[in-house]
Amino acid sequence: MSSVNDFSRRVISNKGDSNFKLRTYVALLSMIADGHFHSGQNIATYLDVSRAAIWKAIKYLKSLGLQIEAVRGRGYRLENQVELLSEKEIIKELSPIARECCNQLAVLFKTESTNSYLLNRLCFEKSHGNVVFAEYQSNGRGRRGNKWVSPLVSGVNVSAVWHFDVAPNVLGLLSLYMGVATARTLSALGVDHVGLKWPNDIVINDKKLGGILLELRGEASGPVDVIIGIGLNYDLPEIVLADIDKLVTDICSHTGKRLSRNKLASILISNVFEILQSLDLDTVPDPSLLDEWRQYDQTLGRKAKLILPSKEIEGILNGVDDQGSLLMIVDEQQKSFTSGEVSLRIQ
C-alpha cells in the first residue's frame, strides 16, 4: 500500500491562511469530539490561536451542520460524542484481500464530493485501488442528479476507484453488487432489518439509510474505470431529518447505539474490494451475489409506481432478472426496466 500521508497531503490544495484555518478546524473538532465541555480559553491556548479565532471556527463548524452547544462559563461541546474517521484505524482493520487491493486511502475533512474528487484525479493519474472518505461533502451527489445531504461527521461517505482492463459482462449488475457489500457490512455489525431497494438504495423498514452512485470512465468493450460512491447516514441531526421530504433513517436512531464509524468503514471497504476482485478473477458471473441481493430485497410483491421521463406506471414488483433489470407485473404482464430509465417510489 502506498503512503497514506502523502496522498492525504495532496487532497486539499489550500495554501497559506486557508490551510491554517483548515488545520484549526480539524484540531478543534478533534478536541471537542469527546462530547465534554472545553473552555474557549483552554482551546485557544492548546491550539495557539486567539479566542476570536476559536469563535469563528466554532461558527464555521456549525455552518457545516455540526451540533455544538455553547454555555457561558463552561465552553463548547458536541451534543453527541463522535468518533472521527482515522486512516490508521480504517487500514488496521481491512481484510487481507482489501489490503492487497487498496492502493491509497485518505480521510478528507471537506471536499465537494468524494466521487468528483476521484473523477478529477483520473484525468492525470492512475487511481486503481484509491479510496477517499470525507467528513463533509459540500456538494454530495446522488442518483439522477439528486443532492446527497450529509452534515459534518453525520455519515460515512466514501468513494473508491476500480480499473477493469476489459469491461466485465456484469458491469450492469455492479450497483446491485455494491448494495450487497453494504448490506453485508451493516448486518455484520448487528444492524437488523437491513434491506435493498432497486437499484441503489440501502433501506430499513422502507426508510432510506444510504445510497450508491456509480460513475464510469472508459469504453463499453475496453478498459474502464469505475468510481463507486457509497453514502450511509450515521447520526443525522433532527433538524436535517425534519427538512428532508422522504422517509429517512440513520444507524444511531435505528440501533440506539453509536457503532464504531472506523470499523464500519473498514468492513465496508473490505466487502467492496472483495467483490471487485472476484469480478476481475472470475470470467463467469457468480450467481450467488444476485441471489444474495434478492434475499435483501424489501420490495418484492409490493405495489409501486415507476416514474419514467414521459409517464408513470403502477404495478407489482417482482424482483430483478439475471441482468439486474427490475421486474414488474403491469396489467398481469411482466415487464422489465433498466436503471437508466426509471425512478422507483414505494407506495
Image: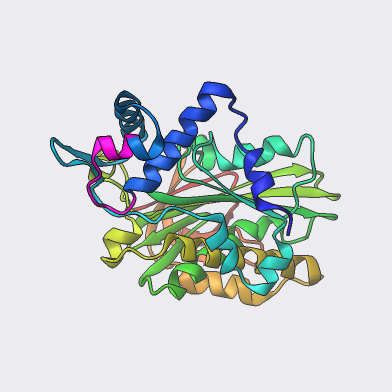
**Rendered residue at 57%/42% (across/down):** 114
User: Which of 76 and 174 lies nearest the eye of the viewer?
Assistant: 76
Q: Can the viewer see residue 77?
A: yes
In this rendering, position of residue 291 left or right of residue 43: right
Q: Identify the residue shown where x is 85% and y is 55%.
A: 165
Q: Is residue 118 above or below residue 20?
A: below
Question: Which is more toward the observer, 184 or 7?
Answer: 7
Residue furthest left in the image = 72
Q: What residue lies at 60% left-to-right and 68% top-to-bottom?
A: 94
Q: Nearer the viewer, residue 303 or 181?
A: 181
Q: Position of residue 325 (x, y in %)?
A: 60, 58
Q: Is residue 42 magenta?
A: yes
Q: Position of residue 104 (x, y in %)?
A: 69, 53
Question: In x, y percent, where is residue 70?
Answer: 19, 37
Residue furthest out toward the bottom: 288
Answer yes or no: is residue 153 visible: no
Query: What residue span does the magenta drawing correspond to?
Result: 33-44
Quarter the N terminus occupies: bottom right
Q: Is 243 situated above or below 225?
A: above
Tag count in the figure? 0
Picture quadrant of residue 177: bottom right
Colouring chosen for the image of the structure = rainbow
Residue 215 belongs to magenta span = no
Q: Position of residue 78 (x, y in %)?
A: 27, 46
Q: Nearer the viewer, residue 7 or 216?
A: 7
Say which residue appears at 48% left-offset and 66% top-offset. 263
23 left or right of 61 in image: right
Q: Is residue 55 above or below residue 38?
A: above
